[in-house]
Structure formats: C-alpha cells, structure tokens
Image (cartoon, rainbow, N blue to C red):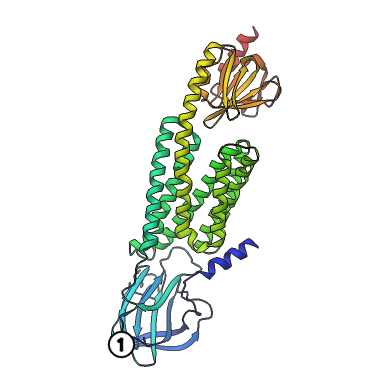
Amino acid sequence: MWRILLTMLLMSLATAGRAQDMPWQTCHGTVGPAGPVLSDCRSVQDFVDPQGRELWIRSVIDAPARSQPRALYVAGVASSEAWLNGQRLGANGRPGATAQAEVAGRYQAIFPIRETAWRPGGNMLVLHLSSFHGGLHFDRPMSAMGVWSYPFRPRTVPLAITFIAAGALLAGAFGFGVIHAMRRTGSSLALTAMAAVAALQAIVESLRTLFDYSYPLHALRMSAIWVLAAAFAILLVAYVATRFLHRARGLMIGLALGGVGATALLPGFDMKTVSALILGAVLAAVPAAAGVRQRVRGARPVLAWLALFLALALGFPAWLADLSYFLLAAGLVLPLLAVEVVRLGRDDRDREAALTRAATRPDRLTVASARGVELVPIAEILAVVGADDYVELRLVGGRSLLHAARLDGLATQLPANFLRIHRSVIANLAKVQRLERDGDRWRLHLSEGAPVPVSRSRQPAVREALDVTRS
C-alpha cells in the first residue's frame, strides 16, 4: 500500500512530456526540401520514448496571444531536432537511426523561435528524436517538452538554499572528521560520512542547473544521486543503532543494507531515491524509540527529527530529493556536532575525575556512566567490551555498566590479571573457566555469562597467561 501511495505522490509532481501535457503524435518521417515529411501518424497514448530508436513526433500548438520571445524547451535523454511550420529551429546533437549515426546531444536544449515562424491559429511543431547512448533505460526519458516564454527564469532561491545546506554539511563533515582524528570514535566517523555524502548529493543534484551536460551523463548523475541517498540512509541507521540500541546494531545495519539496497528495483530514480531515504528514517526510528523508552540521553531529539523527516517526506515528496532532504540533513548534523563537542569535553572531565578517585581506591574502578558515578570492585569485573567511545563492563551477577572510558586507557589501569584478548575485549583471567575452539575461532568461557571472542593473533598469549595463572 505504501508503495502505491508513494508512486501516486511522485507521479503527481512529474513534468515529463506526456500525451496529456501536449497532444503528441508519432509518425514515420523524413526530411524533405520544405522540411519534415510525415506519414502514418498515430496518437501517443502514454509518454514519448525515443530510447533505442529513431522517433518523429508532432503536435499542433496555438500561436502565442502576446508578442513575447518564445523558445522550445526539450529536456531528456535524447538527441533532438525541431521544426515549427516547416522552419528548422535547430538541433541538439544529431538524431539518427542507429547509435553510430547519432551524435549525442545535451540533456537540456533550448530552441529560440523567431516571430516570423508563427502563423495565426494552429502551428505544426515537429521533433526528430533518438536515444542510443543513455546507458540505462528510463521509465520517463523526456522530462519536459514545451514552448515557454524566453528567457527562462532560473530557480535561484532553491539553488541558493541547496548550496547553503551543502556548505553547512561540509562544515559538519570537517568538524566530525577532526573529532574522529582526535578520538577515533565510531559515531564521529559515521557522522562524518553522513554529512559528506549529503553534501555531495546536494552538489550532484544541482549539476543540471549549473552545467549543460551531455545526455549520456544523465544516467551516471541519477545513479550517483540514488547511491548517495542509499549511503546516507544506511549510515543513519548505523549511527542511531550504535547510539541507542548497540546490541542490535548488526541486525539493524543488515536490515538497512537489504531494504535500502532493494529500492534499486523500484521504477524511476525519484522513486528509488525518496524510498531509500524514507526507509532509512523508518528503520532508524526503531532504535531511537528504544532509546527513548530506556531514557538514553539524546534519543528524544533524534526521534523527533526522524518524525519530522518522515512527515515532510510523505507530505511533500516532490521537495525531498531536491531540497528538504539537504536542509533536514544539515539540521541533524550541525546540532549533533555541537552536542558531540560538549559531550566529549564533559567526558574528558569525567575521565580525569574518575582517574583521580580511582588512584585512592586501587581495588575499585570509578565508573562514569549516564546514571552517575559508581565504585565497582575490580574483582567483580568479568570482562570489558568496547562499545564505540564507551566500554561495557560485564559484572558478576549478570549486571553490566556502560563506562565513559576508552578500552586502551583501561588496559593500563586494570591489574595484571586482566588481559587484552581481542581488539575490543579485555578479560579477567581469574574468572576464566576454559579456552575453547569453535571452528576457526577461539572463545573464552568465563565463570558466568556469554563467552567472549579471542583473536587469532592473541590466542598464544592468552594460552600462556592461563598456564601461568593456573600454575
């Protein structure tokens, strides 16, 4: 049902040159001394499609009521040649019956119409089209064909807004890139990538307005737009799941990869792009809602942002891929950048205070978490597992705590019976029951709880340390 609804919404905003927009007829045609010679003309029932063939079409249009410069505007993946009342208006590339005969034109072509070309009443407009170099098959290859007032007014306001949003996103990408270089946190890396791909998509989206590119490049441009939108959607799910539902992060990322990747099968690039973004927001809302239920700091504003994203996407799909997506992406990235800077500063102060207090209590670890500060007996720690820029302390009795510390720092603070057995795991050797091989992997079974992985490179050191401990 949602696919049908979204299709109707997207198709309602389309500007493709269809039979409803202008009453086109397709004909057999050649060029004679007095212009095109057409025969066997039949009405176009759905839309004009010159892909993989040579096509002659005609339409009767009324002369303009006012004396004002007019031009024929043709946009689509085709080379084109145009006549009005037998007078040649111009050519965009060279249409042909084969790929070898055709010279690829630009995606957008403007043919000025002289005042003397008009006749009172009906005027015969003829277009010669062909498209052999499009690269992909488009459901609506011709996005616009019609006579407009000339010169055309550029859409400067949406373009300016898009570039402002792109600049903000690039600034956000730089800021998170600096944070990642300093702290190496997974969240900062994900946000760097999110801001970068959204900014790049804003630039690619604007190419049609900025550059008069050859029509074969349109397939690459549209493919790039979908790929960047899909990448943003997957990164969004990965970031939100990591922050608010860490244990289900793998599952959420897998669902995002499968679902967002499947949007490539949908018809039309607008449909693919909008569906990828909407699906990413829907999937990201699941861990955000879980974070709100568990009262995780920051989950509520992220869920509110996702709700706004979905409301605008479903209410105004025409604006999502062209404008509102970039504003919404900037509206997410920049506040998160400010929050991340404040949070990292606060975490640094908490870590320093925790280290100071821990020095006076060598048998206890001062844990700074969202709940406050807690003194945890070191003897009760089974294992320390890395969780982005936090660590998870697995404790005796099935408890676990998130600690605002880095795994590398804890490795130097904990006693000698704690050993780094994996890049993301430190284990308490005093709580080990056995080291077990599982296929080509090794696992360490503790006195309680789930086993923890042992990396292949650290397995000999673990085996030696266990021998020393037992002796």
Q: Which residue is mark 1?
A: 117
Numbered circles on residues, count? 1
What percent of the width, then of the height, locates residue 296?
60, 37
Q: Is residue 77 above or below residue 420?
A: below
Q: Quadrant of residue 437?
A: top right
Image location (x, y in percent) of residue 62:
40, 88
Neighbours of disc 1 within 10 Å: few (<14), some (14-19), many (20+): some
The amino acid marked with disc number 1 is Ala
Q: Residue at x 54, y 69 (%)?
A: 11
* Residue 365, quarter of picture: top right
Whether residue 304 appears in this view of the structure is yes
Residue at left offset 50%, top offset 37%: 187
Toward the top, the furthest residue is: 471
Q: Position of residue 393 (x, y in %)?
A: 61, 24
Image quarter (top left, top right, bottom left or bottom right) of the N terminus: bottom right
Most distant residue in the front direction: 372
Q: In which quadrant is the C terminus drawn?
A: top right
Q: In the picture provided, is 346 more to the left or to the right than 154?
A: right
User: SS for tag 1?
Assistant: helix
Q: For this rendering, which residue is in front, 179 or 54? A: 179
Return the x and y of residue 462 as percentages of the image width and height.
58, 17
Is 224 placed above or below 25 here?
A: above
Picture layout, residue 39 above or below residue 208: below
Q: Residue at x 49, y 28 (%)?
A: 347
Residue 455 appears in the figure: no
Q: Is residue 399 above or below residue 74?
A: above
